[in-house]
Image (tube, rainbow, N blue to C red):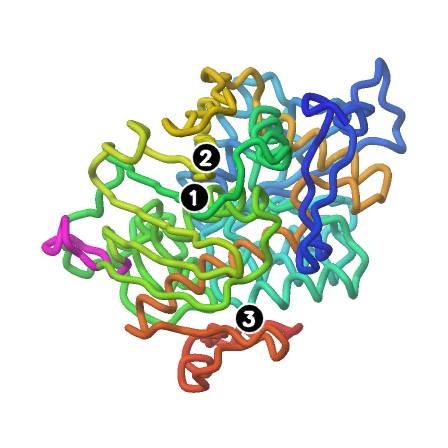
Amino acid sequence: MHSRRVFLQQSLALASGTAIIHPVSSTLGIFKSRISPSDQIKIGAVGLNGMGWSDLEAALKVPGVNVVAICDIDQSVLDRRMKDLQKKGIDTGRIKTYGDYRHIIDRKDVDVVLIGTPDHWHALIMTEACAAGKDVYVEKPVGNSIGECRAMVAARDRYKRIVQCGQWQRSEQHFHDAVEFVYSGQLGNIRTVKVWCYQGWMKPMAVQPDSAPPPGVDFAMWLGPAPQRSFNASRFHFNFRWFWDYAGGLMTDWGVHLLDYGLLGMKADVPKSISALGGKFAYPELAEETPDTLTALYEFDTFNLVWDHAMGIDNGSYGRDHGIAYIGNNATLVLDRNGWEVIEEKQSKNQVSKPLARVTDDGIARHWVNFIDAVRSRKTEDLNCPIEAGAHVATVAQMGNIAFRSGKKLTWDKAAAKFSDLAVDDQYLMKEYHNGYKLAIT
């Protein structure tokens, strides 16, 4: 199959060392001259301050997709997004606004629930939406713990819903082309996969005193299943990423995008052992719990995978601030969001070098086309990033964080699906839910 005619799909089959591919043309059938009333898709969007809004914008470009309800705990966000929708020429008189996601799930006319909340809400809203008969587009990382990831896959299976994870790089052609080249064997034996994320623009806030929430913010609803605490601006909105109660730092924020392709390229399941070192080295005085600097080593049977992240600087490997490098005997393939290239090993005589191939498409837009196509066809196997794929890479990212937090080199018992160290397993495998919330499927 030609590399420019494929989409990669990871599924549970990846656990047995295989990768599934299907033609790109299967995601393009949605573009029809007319959309019948029966093919209209009504979306309710929850969490619209960041990626949730980018997702909704992409969704509304797909013919026959309409937004009927939006939800956010911050009234100023709702007001801003209603104005943004008006600027797009959308009749907002038909759109209801809510501060509680359960109102959207209860609506019979909502076909799809879009989840763009902080990470600690993903599992709860997704499982409840599936139970209510909704299809779901959930932002990455799908869960904030390994246990939540399992619960999300179980909910999709029990309720037979279409669930796409927002890892949109899986719908971008140059990523697929690069992995097809890795599969070709021309790199030779791949001994190491390096995955890195250096983000100069990301910096935690200065430490802030606790305060009253801003007017219009339902902070109790924002906390949801997280532990009870007073409002603090350094933990709110974008900065939730740097606190363990709500997220997992750069490892889960960008790591699920980049580790995903490291695993896909190697057709890898889960590591045998995990170790990690790092800390608050760059900004020890700022408000963060997650490490601003972290290196994690994952051991697989035939190769090692190295994760490396740093906040506040851009000088990453190969002159890139993020990327994946497959280091083989003959050459190294370097891949990022801008394109990919093959750098020949100096001692190699295979002549496998390739110049930079640049990105030519819109991954988020294509990801939504793929999702809506599957919603209409009811073929979950056509999804570019089904929930089990998002759960797989989120689990691997969580393993790196757990190795760092525990300060131990960990081994994973694949047959039992748990850490060999039972104390680590008990402490980190599943998030504790608070404030009366409960995750129904485990």
Q: Secondary structure at mark 2?
A: helix
Q: Secondary structure at mark 3?
A: helix
Tags 2 and 1 touching, CB below 8 Å:
yes
Kind of residue indicated by mark 2: Asp
Left-right relation of 86 to 427: right
* Residue 131 image-quadrant placement: bottom right
Which residue matches tag 2? Answer: 79
Where is the N terminus found, in terms of image quarters?
Answer: top right
Residue at image coords 34%, 57%: 296
Q: Is residue 64 magenta?
A: no
Q: In 3D space, how far apart are the residues under numbered discs 2 and 1 (Cα atoms)? A: 6 Å
Mark 3 closeness class: few <14, some 14–19, many ≥20 residues within 10 Å? some
* Residue 405 image-quadrant placement: bottom left
Residue at image coords 75%, 26%: 24
Percent across and percent down for residue 216 are 38, 48
Q: Earlier in the sequence, mark 2 or mark 3?
A: 2
Mark 2 closeness class: few <14, some 14–19, many ≥20 residues within 10 Å? few
Whether residue 57 appears in this view of the structure is: no
Which dot marks residue 75? 1
- The one nearer the camera, 210 or 323, is 323
* Residue 167 image-quadrant placement: top right
Kind of residue indicated by mark 3: Gly
**Which residue range is magenta in the image?**
279-290
Which residue matches tag 3? Answer: 147
Q: Is residue 280 magenta?
A: yes
